Image: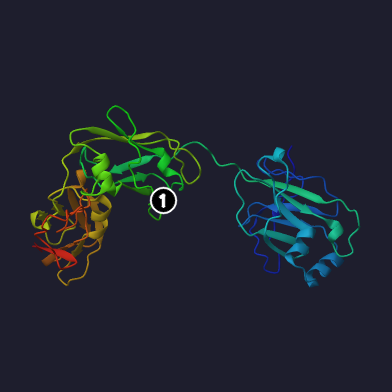
Amino acid sequence: MGPAVRPLRRLPGGSGLTPGLLLVAGVCWAGLIRAAEAPAEFSVHWLAVATPVAVEVSGMSRRAVAALEHEERAAAGWGRLFAVYAEPVEPALGGELPPMAGTWRVADGRLRFEPRFPLEQGVRYRAEFRPAQLPGGEAGAAPVVAFFQLPAPSMVPTTSVARIWPSAAVLPENLLKFYVQFSAPMSRGDVYRHLHLRDAAGRAIELPFLELDEELWDPGLTRLTLLIDPGRIKRGVKPLVDFGPLFETGKTYSLTIDAACRDAAGRPLRADFRKEFRVGPADRTPPDPARWTVRAPAVGTRAALVVRFDEPMDHALASRMIAVAGPDGGALAGEVTLGEDESGWTFVPVRAWQPGAHRLIVPTTIEDLAGNNIGKTFDVDLFERVDRKFSTASVKIPFEVR
């Protein structure tokens, strides 16, 4: 029969403890907590169900408690009485880590310590109470120790590469970027060593990406932007002249993400991911909304507004930048999706379509796969004449809802 587990009662005086299980010295929780033998009058117990996890000392005399309540102590003084340590991951290396930072308080006859930072999974912690440091404490009294450890995180892989954009099988020779979408948040700091661009023979292409110290992740750490080195795209610059383009028209390449790439929990990916693609001619024609087709929805419905581009567009920018304005000029709320190969765009409104004139608003800074903007190519040759310029920040495409 296992050790008894007492229910934790709510303490008076606004202690804020949550009812649950009280873990006392000598009681095991899921096989992860154990405590050393303690003198009968003292008990050190971890509050594993509290938020954050805390540790308490009970069994002190009324005189000692009263003295602690009225005594002014600095953190170092409290630490000499009651301290918590994270034990080294490799004890054989020797050396004890300094005590953890936190706060101490006395309430309802107990001394409580709350760590400043959350405890980490898989790390063993030692709480040590030294009765000799109590006011009027007995010199030479043995410390009372209790251990605690959160379960180690599972290392079973659960994260994978969900998508890579552009999604098309044929990409322009002067492609500017890839987007890699993961199914869960990722860790950052060494992602480039897990990315490989290879030719059809499996040979690695040296330094294909612009490797930035600040990796280009979205706020949720689920989407990574990979910029192709612009020096291998822009005409007239030295890397392109000396080494030629990164991709060659008519050839096949592959982008691989190693399974060794780690997610935010430190787990590897479920499997390698590989995107194979063929390279077509360079694209140096700016996107032109005048060549886009718009299929207007029916009034009174929530049918999709469907737009067909004249060429595939940058996935992230097309998803975020294009807007729909209603008859009053205000932007409409709705859900945007991009179609196959990022050549189409659909918008489903939150509310049913109202009758009247609407407009599709497209910023001129939107990009195609080669980084060309509306009215401007990404790698404008200084000796070429730019025939078309846009003085406005956006292009407006009218459509009627009937």
Q: Residue at (89%, 64%) from the top-left corner?
A: 136
Q: Residue 330: where, in percent of width, then height?
A: 21, 70
Up/down of 62 relative to 28, above or below? below
Q: Residue 120: where, in percent of width, then height?
A: 60, 49
Q: Residue 45: where, in percent of width, then height?
A: 73, 52
Give the position of the C terminus as an image quadrant: bottom left
Q: Is residue 103 left or right of residue 276?
A: right
Give the position of the N terminus as an image quadrant: top right
Nearer to me, 17 or 56: 56
Q: How many numbered tags mark residues here?
A: 1
Q: Residue at (42%, 35%) from the top-left corner?
A: 259
Label 1: few (<14), some (14–19) or many (≥20) C-alpha neighbours in 10 Å = some
Nearer to me, 214 or 218: 214
Query: Could you say whether the residue bearing mark 1 is in a helix, strand or loop?
Result: loop
Q: Is residue 41 left or right of residue 275?
A: right
Asked which colour scheme the image uses, the reply is rainbow
Amino acid under label 1? Leu
Q: Residue furthest right?
A: 139
Q: Residue at (63%, 53%) from the top-left corner?
A: 49
Residue 264 is at least partly visible in this image: yes
Q: Residue 233: where, in percent of width, then height?
A: 24, 46
Up/down of 336 relative to 173, above or below? below
Residue under circle 1?
221
Q: Is residue 290 left or right of residue 332?
A: left
